[in-house]
Image: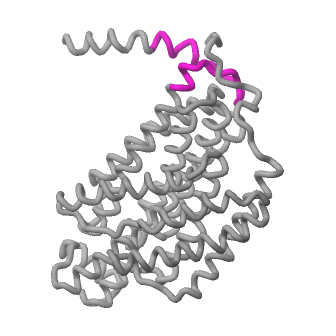
Amino acid sequence: MKSVQSLKRRATPVVEWALPLWTRGPAGRETPEDLFRVLYTGWLVAFAFKVLGASWDVSWHFKWLRDDLAPPHLLNSVGTAVALALTVVHLYTGYGVDRLAQRLIGWGTGVFLLAVPLDLINHRVNGLDITSWSPSHMLLYIGTLFMICGVIRGWFMGAPAGRARTAVLGALFVFLFENVWFPAQHQEYGVFGLAAWDRGKPEAEPILLQFAADQMGRPVDRVMMANFTLPVPDAVYPLYAAGAAMIVLIVARAMIGRMFAATSVAAAYVAYRTLIWPLLAVAGFPHSAVPVFLIAGAVAVDLAFLIPIPVVRAVVGALGVTVVLDQALRVQNALFTSPPLVPPTTMLAGGVLLAALWLGAEWFTRRRRPKAQDMEAVVSATAAP
């Protein structure tokens, strides 16, 4: 009884503060400073839960048979619930976002929520989904991508200048980078899974291996194991690193506007993977390769921004980043481990893709470069609810 009364006493001032703010309004309305801070702190919490759940989830699925109520799914669901609540606030009140940010958050959350039942139906119909690259899984990543992009824009446009603004913007880009890179973790776990099989000590439980084998119509053998652990062509991993991962770092460097911003984002992600790796391993979950080579590509991105001419920066930068990325991946493979390597000529396609994306980003930012505090509504410390 006392605990209920204590909870009520603590909740009362929060409710009294929030209720006057719960009014319908257009996107871009003037936002009280304390509300803006609460909203974006909530987003950081939501994304933290989602990242922790996702990190556990990918390792879980290389060991156990899928379960809708598995602990990683529940942890991820906490983050999803917080994100959904914040989305409702942004859509209804218009606080903390301009129109574009509001639409990105709304559409992203909608796509993610649509993907959840589609993924469940996919598993019910097709059984075990043995790849991170399936259509239903990609919808989850795409929905989260739009969601985080909306949050990044909302913070970029509304947050007051200062170290806190830069730090939070960097953190949001780390979450974006993690979401984009997430499907590539299948190969990073897969290379260890296949090596464990070759040693005669598979990391996956027998029930999972048998389920995967039955789905493929094969016995539990090395061919089945290779298809289970490394289901996409070897070229996908380096090409995805050159295209998808690097363009996120390029946009991060452009928006944060600080030297070595891209390196900081990539290093923070790699540091997280390095810290979570032994925790999962101690708990008995499968091991994975850590993409340290991405830091080298990030350094090349930052150095490319020393070139003042946008077109030259994009073309020369794409070439330099691709070469550095390819060589760093080979060094990592020799010193530690990585997914299977491909001929250097394969990376030419990645360089061409990156150059096209980089040129597009330069063109877009020159024509429609957003400026912080340039939207109709800014955060106001003196605004009345």
Is 358 located above or below residue 90 in the figure? below
In magenta stretch: residue 109: no
Position of 303 with respect to 118 (left or right) is right
Quarter of the picture containing the N terminus is top left
Q: Nearer the viewer, residue 158 or 95?
A: 158
Q: Nearer the viewer, residue 292 or 14?
A: 292
Q: Position of residue 94 (x, y in %)?
A: 66, 28
Q: Quadrant of residue 303?
A: bottom right
Q: Position of residue 318 (x, y in %)?
A: 66, 70
Q: Nearer the viewer, residue 241 or 383?
A: 241
Is 249 located above or below residue 9 in the figure? below
Position of 11 with respect to 99 (left or right) is left
Residue at horizontal 63%, vertical 82%?
348
Residue at horizontal 51%, vertical 16%?
18
In magenta stretch: residue 26: yes
The total number of labels drawn is 0
Residue at horizontal 72%, vertical 25%?
377
Q: Quadrant of residue 104?
A: top right
Q: Position of residue 113 (x, y in %)?
A: 51, 49
Quarter of the picture containing the C terminus is top right
Residue at horizontal 80%, vertical 58%?
363
Q: Position of residue 15 (x, y in %)?
A: 45, 14
Q: Residue furthest right?
A: 367
Give the magenta range. 15-37
- How are the residues colored? one colour
Is 278 located above or below residue 127 in the figure? above
